[in-house]
Image: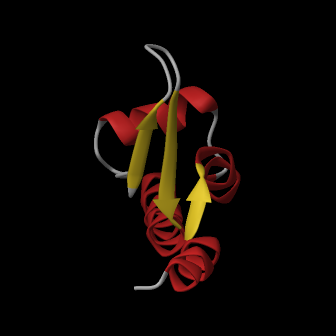
Amino acid sequence: MKRDEFIKYAKEHLISTHEARKITDQSIKAFQQSVKNEKLIPALEIKESDKRVIRLFFRDEVEAYKDHMNDWQAARKK
């Protein structure tokens, strides 16, 4: 894959943790728990320091997880 093709693909399909949290409508702690429990698996992790890690997620996987969350919440309300 050429560099420009990769950049185009990444812009269309990868999202930041912040964007993923907005889609799932989760608090920071809840989102971290989802990642820790491997409900959401980052496509890419870049460790900047001991405390800071940049994570990128596939948009379609985050959207699918949000759909599953909605199903779980609806089932709990019954």
Q: Residue at x 41, y 43 (%)?
A: 45
Q: Residue at x 50, y 26 (%)?
A: 48
- Say which of 47 and 16 sits in front: 47
User: Residue 36: x, y in percent?
Assistant: 33, 34
Q: In the picture provided, is 60 more to the left or to the right than 17?
A: left
Q: In the picture provided, is 27 more to the left or to the right than 42?
A: right
The reply to whether residue 76 is in sight is: yes
> Image quadrant of residue 9?
bottom right
- Say which of 67 and 8 sits in front: 8
- Say which of 70 and 19 sits in front: 19
State the scheme by which the image is colored: secondary structure
Q: Is residue 34 above or below residue 58?
A: above
User: Residue 35: x, y in percent?
Assistant: 38, 40
Q: Residue at x 46, y 84 (%)?
A: 2
The reply to whether residue 78 is in sight is: no
Q: Is residue 39 above or below residue 33?
A: below
User: Residue 39: x, y in percent?
Assistant: 33, 50
Total numbered circles: 0
Q: In the picture provided, is 31 more to the left or to the right than 37?
A: right
Q: Residue at x 40, y 85 (%)?
A: 1
User: Residue 30: x, y in percent?
Assistant: 52, 33
Residue furthest top in the image: 50
